[in-house]
Image: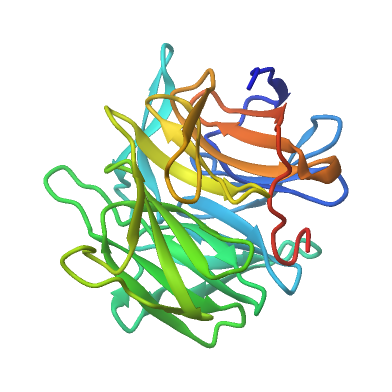
Amino acid sequence: MTVRIQEIAAGLRFPEGPIAMPDGSLLLVEIEGRTLTRVGTDGRVERIVQLQGGPNGAALGPDGKVYICNNGGFKWHDSAEHGIRPIGQADDYTGGWIETVDLASGRVERLYERSESGPLRGPNDLVFDRQGGFWFTDHGKTRARDVDRGSVYYARADGSSIREIIFPLWSPNGIGLSADERTLYVAETFTGRIWAFELSAPGEIKPQPWPHSPQGGRLVAGLPGYQNLDSLALDSAGNICVATLSNGGITVVSPCGAHIEHIPMPDAMTTNLCFGGPSLQTAFITLSSTGRLVAMEWERPGLGLNFLNV
């Protein structure tokens, strides 16, 4: 694939969680800036609402609100050479949560701060199923001498139910559903692995047996060398398109893991992508350490998202 990218917006404070809206605008969060932000079709940047903690992943829900995974906040390193990047748990961290933003009023509401397994640590990314529930990853937090083990949860959009479904995972980050919603994909950051979980019903997995699987999943791919994985999106062919850190770019992996392609980006902290534009054939990509949102034409349409495209 020939890489020709167009800069849509700059000056963002570690952008993540892009949502390509039907009117052509883009919503995203700025983790370091702690905002929900709109980028207009003319590239104009509008901060919709100021948030607390560390707004991370974002998705449009069945009620038209934006649902946000808030990781609770990071410490940051900023350099002229490499831009900004997170380096661990914030000093003022008190926990993570799931929150919603009403786009009409700007009202922010916390939906979940804990489950039956305990408090949320570092919610990272989410995806809605067609029933209106959502899966989300809890990446956990990293401190100087220890790190949390992560989980995947399933929750209702109305705040009535949250359950930990998959545990343990090491730094779970990106999450996505196959078109038939029979498979849930999860990317682990620090292992560079992509896992697939067979779904038996909404909010339920059919686990693979131990010792072949440590948490019920099937290993789709593990990237060689030093490559970390961030958020992901699926395309219409079922490929898993994962934003890749250190080796900055988008890594495209077939559903069976047999084919892997890397599309380089000019930022080592390439963190997320979404599909939009005519026929969902434009990829909008967050280049976070340099604070940019860019776009490129994709050779296949993206997979439509519930309550946004389908």
Which quadrant of the structure image shows residue 150? Answer: bottom left
In the displayed orientation, state which residue is furthest to the left.
Answer: 145
Q: What is the residue that sits farthest to the bottom in this orientation?
A: 160
Asked which quadrant contains residue 47, the reply is top right
The picture places residue 147, in percent across and down from the top left corner, at 19, 52
Residue 242 seen in the current view: yes
Q: Position of residue 20 (x, y in %)?
A: 74, 47
The residue drawn where x is 49% and y is 21% is 267
Q: Is residue 130 above or below residue 169?
A: below
Q: Residue furthest top?
A: 81
Image: 173 above or below 201:
above
Q: Quadrant of the C terminus?
A: bottom right
Q: Residue at x 70, y 65 (%)?
A: 306
Q: Quadrant of the N terminus?
A: top right
- Whether residue 94 can be seen here: no
> Between residues 306 and 81, which one lies in front from this camera angle?
306
Q: Please give the count of numbered marks on the rendered protein.
A: 0
